[in-house]
Image (cartoon, helix red, strand yellow):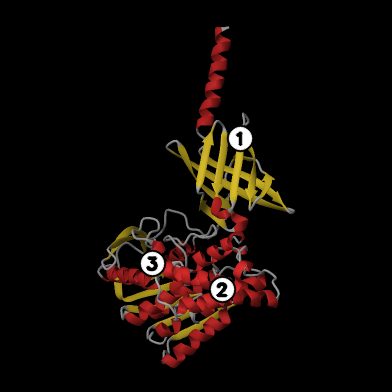
Amino acid sequence: MNKLFIILALSIFSINSFAQDISGNWIGILEIQGTELDFGFNLVKNGDNYKTTMNVPKQGLINTKVEMTTFLDSALTISHPALKMEYQGRLNQLNEITGKISLAGNTFPMNIKKGKIEINRPQEPKTPFDYYSEDLTFLNEKAKITLSGTLTLPKEKGNFPVAIIISGSGPQNRDGEMFGHKPYLVIADFLTKNGVGVLRFDERGVGKSEGDFKTATIKDFSSDINSAINYLKNRDDINSSKIGLIGHSIGGIIAPKVASENTDVNYIVLLAGPGINGDKLMLSQKAALERIMGLNEMQIAQGQDLVKGAYDIIVNSDLDTTTLKDSLNSFYTNKYGNLLPKNQKNALVNQITGYEIVSLIKSKPIIYLSKVKCAVLALNGSKDFQVPAKENLGAIKKILEENGNNNAKTIELENLNHLFQECKTGALSEYSQIEQTISPAVLQLITDWIKEQTK
């Protein structure tokens, strides 16, 4: 009898102990409209609560931070109001959680069990590297913040040319993690193996870098790049006359801005860099995206009308954020009245009044490109809907020719998207589904061109 009691007691203790901690990776499959979506949750114990990140690769959600997680009496709730997602389930004795998931008000059954979504990224380099890699910090004296990054060099000792990678829009870490890919890590690895050093760093307020990303503009990010250049110039293992910039997307605005003002820049590579004004770029991007989504031209025109007036207000104003929001709210109220629901209006206004977005809408790349005297390589994919190739490359080529820059090359690359992946449509949904991080041909093209400039 005593032995049976001990066995039962141990069993209860085991179940209760397990129920107290559900840390780790959990996976589930949501079946919706004939499609299967893999959901992954990673739960990390944080005192009496949990911190959770979510992965839905087919939707481009990778390591997305969840706003709230609770686990009490075997009941789990994972909630992300901004995405209109909530998962509710209960842990059973089979070490599984049976439950349901709500998406935008629609509820579906979904059970989750221990496991991890494996994303194949064959180009992603793994340690140990066959080159020198150093984690470092440098100071932006003007902003009074310290930025953290990684410098890779072909060898520990030498005097090497170096490229600084400038991130695209949104808060980016040094690897440029997006859609399950690490494109800046892949670029750095390839260049360094071929004799060109690379400095990549966490943007301000991201990763280990200080500062506030939310209040930063193109001017602020340019200041960070100038600080990186000043740091590199003071290292003995860097050829200070061969420092260049590789700017992706909005980084393709920052690179010519810095190069037009700083003679220490030897060359710039623009990866999907804008050549037209920011407001026109945003309109072009919106139209291209909606065509991929299958909208007709009348619907696209209506979409253009929805935002163009707001962009005009932003371009022509120097209002502070609060006043600008008030101005845009009044604009939409006067234009649409009750036809535009208040929640949609507020969401739209909040989206287009972020500091980075406002500085992008107001940007005029032509001003910087007209002053760039260093070597320029501008690349765009033919299936890039975010920075459409023809109009942007055309604008870049035109202004550089008028500028008299004889060392400039613009190339449109067939069947590549905004991330320079080989793709079918260029749609955002493909980014995470494509195993390739960046086309090998692009990596080789960038490398060969930089080596030609720095030989």
Give the crowd class for mark 2: few <14, some 14-19, many >=20 residues within 10 Å.
Answer: few
Label pair 1/2, CB-CB below 8 angstroms: no
- What residue does disc 2 label? 334
Q: Distance between the residues labelled 1 and 2?
A: 49 Å
Could you say where residue 306 lies in the image, as x and y percent from the top left? 59, 74
- What residue does disc 3 label? 216
Residue 54 vertical placement versus 301 (above, below): above
Secondary structure type for disc 3: loop
Q: Residue 434 sits in which quadrant?
A: bottom right
* Quarter placement of the N terminus: top right
Q: In this view, does 162 lie to the left or right of 27?
A: left
Could you say where residue 263 lies in the image, as x and y percent from the top left? 31, 81
Q: Distance between the residues labelled 2 and 3?
A: 31 Å
Q: What residue type is labelled 1?
A: Arg
Q: Residue 207 sits in which quadrant?
A: bottom left
Which residue does the image show at 61% across and 57% down from the upper left?
59
Decide which of tag 1 and tag 2 comes sooner along the chain: 1
Residue 341 visible here: yes
Could you say where residue 75 lies in the image, as x and y percent from the top left? 57, 35
Decide which of tag 3 and tag 1 comes sooner along the chain: 1
Please identify, in this view, whether the residue under mark 2 or under mark 3 is nearer the observer. Answer: 2
Secondary structure type for disc 1: strand
Q: Is residue 257 left or right of residue 109?
A: left
Q: Residue 90 carries which label?
A: 1
Secondary structure type for disc 2: helix
Which residue does the image show at 30% across and 62% down from the upper left?
145
Residue 378 vertical placement versus 24 (above, below): below
Residue 384 visible here: no
